[in-house]
Amino acid sequence: MSLFGGLRVSASALSAERLRLNVIAENIANAETTRTPEGGPYRRREVILASGMGLGEPGERGSAGGVHVAGVLPDPTPPRLVHDPSHPDANAEGYVAMPNVDVPAEVVDMMAATRAYEANALALQSQRRLQERALELLA
């Protein structure tokens, strides 16, 4: 791994977790959205992360690659049906298709993403301090 390989790994994880937090926030914000431009209720989205092989130095073999976002996909879980005949989006039987967002589960995911972000920020700071110390010793 090059001198900056560890920094790249942590930076890629920070970027991925930031996107994950943004998507979770969007899910929570749309937990009650029953009508979207695409039609129907909002569909929960989830971030798919993958190992980021190939982010190392060109030609470097076995380099640490970090992570990257492989995609942001809609959750295939069907919408919840809630009986509310007075709702403007209710069907003929009085049921409203609500988003497939489980707010408590989203909060747990947000806490996990926050902890992962914090851990990678700490790793980035530690690597920077180690490199600064190494430069001081060499000078």
Image: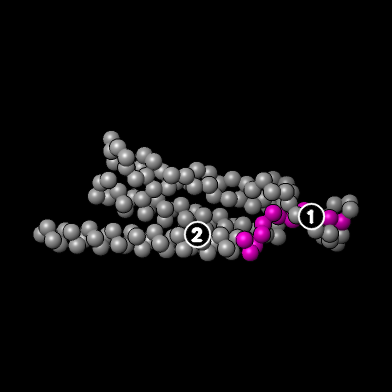
In which quadrant is the C terminus drawn? bottom left
Instruction: Tell me what residue is drawn at x 56 percent, y 60 percent.
Output: 109
Q: Point out residue 108 in the picture as x, y percentages from the top left corner.
A: 57, 63
- State which tag comes first along the sequence, 1 or 2: 1
Question: Looking at the image, is 106 positioned above or below residue 39?
Answer: below
Query: Looking at numbered disc 1 in the image, what kind of residue is underneath it?
Result: Leu
Question: From this viewpoint, is residue 58 visible?
Answer: no
Label 1 and label 2: CA atoms lie apart by: 29 Å
Which residue carries the number 1 mark? 81
Q: Point out residue 98 in the picture as x, y percentages from the top left corner.
A: 74, 56
In which quadrant is the N terminus drawn? top left
Q: Which residue range is magenta in the image?
A: 94-105
Question: From this viewpoint, is residue 132 visible?
Answer: yes
Q: Is residue 74 left or right of residue 86?
A: left
Label 1 packing within 10 angstroms: few (<14), some (14-19), many (20+): some
Assess whether residue 98 is covered by the magenta stretch: yes
User: Residue 61, located in which quarter of the rendered image?
Assistant: top left
Q: How many numbered markers are drawn? A: 2
Instruction: Tell me what residue is drawn at x 18 percent, y 59 percent.
Output: 134
Instruction: Tell me what residue is drawn at x 30 percent, y 48 percent.
Output: 5
Query: Looking at numbered disc 2 in the image, what kind of residue is underneath it?
Result: Ala
Label 2 SS: helix
User: Residue 56, located in which quarter of the rendered image?
Assistant: top left
Assess whether residue 61 is covered by the magenta stretch: no
Residue sticking out furthest to the top: 59
Label 1 SS: strand
Q: Is residue 35 left or right of residue 115?
A: right
The mark found on residue 113 in the picture is: 2
Q: Is residue 26 left or right of residue 123?
A: right
- Give 36 or 23, whichever is nearer the viewer: 23
